[in-house]
């Protein structure tokens, strides 16, 4: 119950005045009697025969006080909220993404959302039942928290058990899931969130319920850890999302022990880079953490972590007898990071434990070795030079090859691809090449007027790089002598393939990415260990998840994940938020209903029904009772006096 005019309760101050007047008023009456003794005796006899005499004296003020209470209660306009009714079914979606862990007025946004959800199930009832869903869920934990039910106790329990997720704000998957359960125009969808920007397009109107207010935050939005030369480098990007200049301490820790610290001044809404560097001795394989010791509304982005991985030499197998190729010299120039092993095609017996195998088809024997490249060990990445029609892993219908015997020049490059970063091959000339119809999984990097010249592909856990010409033969092309673009392209290609040799890999290669470090919600590809080994991953909350395939998707928490075989730890990777949009803690003010008029027509809006008429009617009846009792008491007194006179 609520009161639409609570100021009316000030009228209760009249009650003490009425009570005081009742006890202070004089009760003196003049009557003519023949004898005072006779009158006193009659009065005493009358009082002795009337029960509850003291109560009788208090009944009038009690009735008057009750009358004033009812009048005040009625003037306050009491009202009852009558639940709305949905003829169809209702789907209640509660946002539990990372930004809902923001703390405001002592409560998280998720707690405020749970309060709003509980209020919603009390005020709205659905004839077909109500379903409870969340916006963030892992593969083992579906979006549905409670199936369609009319049992409010189950819905309340489901609301209380909604977990806080560290995944970014993404409504598309849950909206796609919810749309499968909307069967008629009578079904309604409710969304409880702090942000309603960029809602996915849907054929159904969404009833938006907003929670939370503007919040202040300082967070880490960029983070990388690597060994460069003989030093480690930890680069941190700290962004100030507040409206004032802030001075922030940035701490570097090894595991949980503080190792170094810097203080930076960050202007409002700007990002400040912070660099830590030093001797990596004793730190390789350990977890480096960066922490911001600040008190703000969002603590999730105040810490990041990564495992400092040592620089391992890339094992490369070159299958070639091309005496004109400049590739061996180019690879040996990076001997610090490359372990090169070269064999002639006749001695090729397999890739063994090589990370990358390069097959040079610049000679007839080299073309014959290409056919045996299909026997390369799983996980070995492949580079093919001038393969012609002998390219393995591609069906005849997928890659039709045409000989191009005339000179061609580069006219187009894929500038946005990571391998082409800072690489310009415009003007490279080729005397002889081939043109191929790319398979569906291939992507062109360099093109001539005759077709694709260099392309990449990824399939079956391997990465492929194909040169459709004798790229490193200066008698055929000036590609290898294009400095620094050609060497840079080769080194960036090797770096891309090297990222694929890690135990934990992203689905897509990113230039400059920290090894074994991922974002929340990002799938992790796990390289094969021994067949038949029992593998499981321990999450930051110490929950264990069995590894059943090569793709791990339950990266829903920030922290360190460790892969175990039986009870033996193998290797760890980290998961960080690093999402500026989430850290901004944006807030959208939304009404409870997208279309209020349609809501009222459908009976969805909870109704407020005033009930002041009932206490007003009761007050009138009480007034009549008080009037009747007052006059009845006066008549009784007069009758008693008349009897005494007689």
Image (cartoon, grey):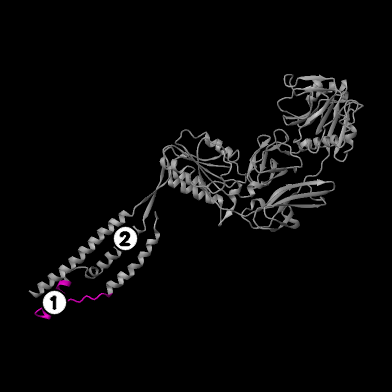
Q: Furthest-right residue in view?
A: 323
Within the magenta stretch, is there residue 46?
A: yes
Taking 540 as reference, is 551 above or below it?
above
* Residue 71 disc label: 2
Considering the numbered disc 2 on the image, is that residue within a helix, a strand or a loop? helix
Taking 537 as reference, is 369 above or below it?
above
Q: Earlier in the sequence, mark 2 or mark 1?
A: 1
Quadrant assignment for the C terminus: bottom left
Using the rendered image of the protein, determine whether residue 258 is visible from the camera's viewpoint. Answer: yes
Taking depth in this image into account, of 94 and 547 the one nearest to the observer is: 94
* Residue at 15% in and 68% down: 636
Q: For mark 2, does the 10 Å Cα neighbourhood hold few (<14), some (14 to 19), or many (20 or more) residues?
A: many
Location of residue 8 (image quadrant): bottom left
492 lies left or right of 57: right
* Residue at 60% in and 44% down: 169
Report how far apart the C-alphas of labels 2 and 1 lie in the structure.
38 Å
Report x, y in % for residue 44.
16, 75
Considering the numbered disc 1 on the image, is that residue within a helix, a strand or a loop? loop
Location of residue 438 (image quadrant): top right
Within the magenta stretch, is there residue 335?
A: no
**Mark 1 highlights which residue?**
31
Highlighted magenta segment, given as a residue range = 24-47
Taking 414 as reference, is 616 above or below it?
below
Quadrant assignment for the N terminus: bottom left
Using the rendered image of the protein, determine whether residue 307 is visible from the camera's viewpoint. Answer: no
Report x, y in % for residue 519.
68, 43
């Amino acid at each position: 119950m609520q009161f639409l005019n609570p100021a009316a309760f000030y009228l209760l101050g009249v009650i003490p005045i009425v009570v005081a007047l009742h006890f202070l008023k004089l009760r003196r009456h003049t009557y003519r009697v023949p004898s005072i003794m006779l009158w006193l005796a009659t009065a005493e006899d009358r009082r002795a025969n009337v029960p509850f005499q003291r109560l009788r004296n208090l009944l009038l003020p009690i009735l008057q006080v009750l009358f004033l209470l009812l009048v005040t209660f009625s003037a306050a306009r009491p009202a009852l909220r009558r639940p709305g009714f949905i003829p169809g079914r209702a789907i209640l979606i509660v946002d539990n993404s990372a930004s809902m862990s923001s703390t405001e007025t002592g409560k998280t946004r998720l707690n405020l959302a749970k309060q709003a959800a509980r209020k919603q199930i009390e005020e709205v009832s659905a004839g077909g039942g109500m379903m409870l869903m969340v916006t963030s869920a892992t593969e083992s934990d579906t979006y549905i928290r409670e199936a369609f039910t009319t049992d409010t106790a189950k819905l309340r329990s489901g609301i209380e058990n909604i977990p806080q997720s560290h995944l970014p704000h993404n409504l598309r998957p849950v909206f796609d899931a919810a749309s499968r359960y909307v069967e008629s125009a009578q079904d309604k969808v409710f969304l409880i969130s702090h942000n309603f920007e960029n809602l996915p397009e849907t054929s159904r109107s969404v009833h938006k319920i907003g929670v939370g207010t503007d919040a202040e935050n300082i967070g880490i939005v960029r983070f990388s850890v690597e060994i460069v030369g003989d030093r480690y480098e930890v680069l941190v990007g700290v962004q100030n999302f507040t409206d004032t200049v802030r001075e922030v301490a940035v701490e570097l820790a090894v595991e949980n022990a503080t190792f170094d610290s810097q203080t930076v001044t960050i202007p409002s809404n700007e990002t400040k880079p912070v660099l830590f560097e030093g001797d990596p001795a004793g730190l390789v394989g350990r977890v480096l953490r960066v922490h911001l010791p600040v008190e703000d509304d969002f603590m999730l982005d105040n810490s990041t972590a990564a495992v400092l991985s040592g620089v391992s030499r890339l094992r490369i197998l070159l299958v070639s007898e091309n005496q004109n190729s400049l590739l061996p010299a180019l690879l040996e120039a990076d001997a610090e990071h490359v372990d090169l092993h070269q064999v002639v095609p006749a001695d090729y017996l397999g890739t063994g434990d090589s990370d990358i195998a390069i097959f040079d088809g610049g000679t007839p024997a080299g073309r014959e070795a290409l056919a045996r490249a299909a026997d390369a060990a799983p996980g070995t990445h492949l580079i093919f030079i001038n393969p012609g029609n002998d390219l393995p892993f591609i069906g005849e219908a997928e890659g039709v090859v045409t000989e191009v015997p005339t000179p061609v020049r580069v006219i187009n490059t894929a500038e946005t691809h990571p391998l082409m970063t800072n690489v310009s091959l415009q003007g490279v000339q080729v005397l002889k090449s081939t043109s191929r119809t790319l398979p569906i999984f291939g992507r062109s990097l360099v093109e001539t007027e005759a077709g694709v010249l260099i392309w990449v592909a990824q399939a079956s856990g391997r990465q492929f790089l194909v040169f459709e010409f004798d790229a490193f033969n200066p008698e055929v092309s000036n590609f290898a002598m294009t400095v620094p673009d050609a060497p840079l392209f080769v080194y960036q290609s090797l770096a891309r393939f090297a990222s694929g040799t890690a135990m934990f890999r992203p689905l897509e290669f990113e230039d400059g990415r920290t090894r074994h470090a991922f974002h929340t919600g990002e799938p992790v590809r796990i390289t094969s260990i021994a067949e038949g080994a029992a593998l499981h991953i321990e999450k930051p909350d110490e929950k264990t998840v069995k590894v059943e395939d090569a793709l791990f998707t339950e990266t829903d928490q920030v922290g360190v994940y460790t892969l175990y075989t039986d009870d033996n730890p193998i290797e760890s990777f980290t998961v960080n938020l690093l999402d500026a949009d989430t850290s901004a803690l944006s807030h959208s003010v939304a009404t409870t209903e997208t279309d209020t008029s349609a809501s009222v027509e459908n009976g969805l809006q909870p109704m407020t029904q005033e009930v002041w008429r009932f206490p007003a009617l009761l007050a009138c009846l009480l007034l009549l009772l008080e009037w009747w009792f007052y006059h009845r008491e006066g008549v009784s007194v007069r009758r008693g006096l008349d009897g005494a006179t007689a």
